[in-house]
Image (tube, helix red, strand yellow):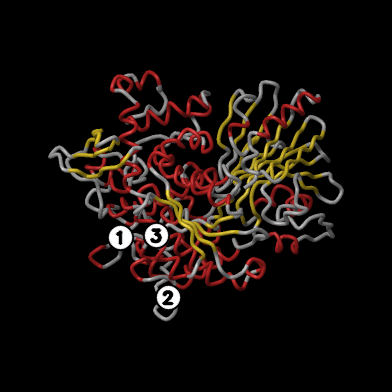
Amino acid sequence: MCGILAVLNCHDCSLAKRSRVLELSRRLRHRGPDWSGLYNYGNHFLSHERLAIVDPASGDQPLFNDDKSIVVTVNGEIYNHEALKASLKQPHTFRTQSDCEVLAHLYEEFGEDMVSMLDGMYSFVLLDTRDNSFIAARDPIGITPLYMGWGTDGSLLFASEMKALMNDCEQFQTFPPGHIYSSKTGGLRRYYEPEWFSESIPSTPYNAQLLREAFEKAVVKRLMTDVPFGVLLSGGLDSSLVAAVACRHIGETKAGKQWGSKIHSFCVGLKGSPDLKAAREVADYLGTLHTEFHFTVQEGLDAIPEVIYHIETYDVTTIRASTPMFLMSRKIKSLGVKMVLSGEGSDELFGGYLYFHKAPNKEEFHRETCRKVKNLHLYDCLRANKSTSAWGLEARVPFLDKEFIDVAMGMDPDAKMIRRKEGRIEKWVLRNAFDDEDKPYLPKHILYRQKEQFSDGVGYSWIDGLKAYAEEQITDQMMANAAYIYPYNTPTTKEAYYYRRIFEGYFPQYSAKATVPGGPSVACSTAKALEWDEAWSKNPDPSGRAALGIHDKCYQKPAERHIIERVGGESYNKMLSSEESIHAAVPVQ
């Protein structure tokens, strides 16, 4: 991932302003540590912090068309760039092998309509010096982050992270996925409008072969790289399928010929965690070069302030899952790897979260998946992108391929419904599509392993330890005053209060807190899905173990509480039920 910043229509074009733009751009350099570029035309500045993945030698940005009248700064990857080059009607000269250079040439021929032609993950700002107009756009799902803000001098700013905007913008907001901003109209418009977006119920029959082929195509196109890469492997269904397909097809690709057919895989967790064991088994089965990283609860707690600064949210479940990913990304980058494939998006597309067991009918099931996919940019996409980009590592997500989404969201949702009596657990349609007896992709017990949310799978004591630590840091009196201190998205738990306090230390503006979603959730549900089970409204925790009666390791009833004990010279967090039965004992130091 790269970092982009655009300051447009600014009143001040002095050298001091240029220095200020460079200063703001440096706040994004963790995203792109390989090179920096700045282009100034009149009262416009386009800046770029590059992470070199494709054409690392000559693909520095900003990028131009032939006569340099069109300039673009891009964060992302354009997977169909070769096909787009072939679609150009006029002769064009390309200065680099970068997949992103085609954007300037496409705009020259197709104008703003070019954005609908793109297949990839991207955020970009394009300046047309011929008429002094500009556009900005973000990919359909919001895999890459983008924010926009307004300065008091009449300027309009765009940036990959809001830390580059917060001091120079009077107001700023999240740039919505699947939209384009045009200076010619002075506003946003949606360019991505697939059939599923209306939330009407599809009727296309489930086709296992079509689903499998679409996913394999999505994985293969993401093996476009000129640098060392790997796969994040938790041992769950989604990451294991990504790894299995990548291993099966790597030999056919340019990357395989350049870097070899043995794929590196990586996993993180507390020692003895469910993910570490499952990931090792999958890695052995697939023959990957596997590395596992361990962290302690204390190391995770120490990292939380830095995690919140980088991911720019106070959402509880996002912070829980981002912390292990943040720690792992640092280790991966230290090994020389710059790109990884990851499994985000599957649970939203197929209703993989455990609360989907309670979906009352296929209509509600489908509408909930639509809501989840539409909000991915606020949760899992934000986590996957910013946790990795904090260390100059790029994460690619095959499940969020545009064509694959059309297949997954276009099938009759009755096929996705969970029917345990019939042996159909969550994501059965995906599991069944890859259940190949002749040439197995994965061992059966991995293919049918129960869903673990990432923050649970790294070790159940991680979340238990977070809750206990927050209990020590936040007093009952703080919680009693929470609605006065934080009237917007008031935290309802001590853990949420703890994160919010850190967040507002970094990002005190109202615009910043307004970029974070709120509302109750159980096991990562939307607030609407809480209506499916009355008991959930009494247990609003985003952990998968909050799906009482569904998760094999669900929280015990009645409600548990934490105590702090000292054993020898060491502190332990113990979570006890009202009957004083021990649920967990986790060393703090």
Residue 505, x across and y down, in percent: 49, 24
Residue 500, x across and y down, in percent: 42, 29
Residue 353 against residue 213 in the figure, above or below? above
* Mark 1, secondary structure of its residue: loop
Work out whether residue 353 can be spotted.
Answer: yes
In this view of the protein, which residue sits in the foreground, 412 or 280? 280
Contact, mark 2 vs mark 1 (Cβ under 8 Å)? no
Q: Earlier in the sequence, mark 3 or mark 1?
A: 3
Left or right side of 552 for 254 = right
Residue at image location 53% in from the left, 72% down from the top:
248
Q: Earlier in the sequence, mark 2 or mark 3?
A: 3
Q: Amino acid at mark 1?
A: Ile
In this view of the protein, which residue sits in the foreground, 372 or 352? 352
In this view of the protein, which residue sits in the foreground, 419 or 437? 437
Using the numbered discs, state the Cα–Cα distance from disc 2 to disc 1 in whole angstroms: 24 Å
Left or right side of 241 for 415 = left
Q: Amino acid at mark 3?
A: Gly
Report the residue marked by disc 2. Answer: 440
Report the residue marked by disc 3. Answer: 236
Label 1, residues with CA under 10 Å away: few <14, some 14-19, many ≥20: many
* Mark 2, secondary structure of its residue: loop
- What label sits on residue 418 in the rendered view? 1
Outermost residue toward the front? 568
Using the numbered discs, state the Cα–Cα distance from disc 2 to disc 3 in whole angstroms: 16 Å
Outermost residue toward the left? 579
- What label sits on residue 375 in the rendered view? none
Residue at image location 57% in from the left, 42% down from the top:
390
Residue 383 against residue 233 in the figure, above or below? above
Q: Amino acid at mark 2?
A: Pro
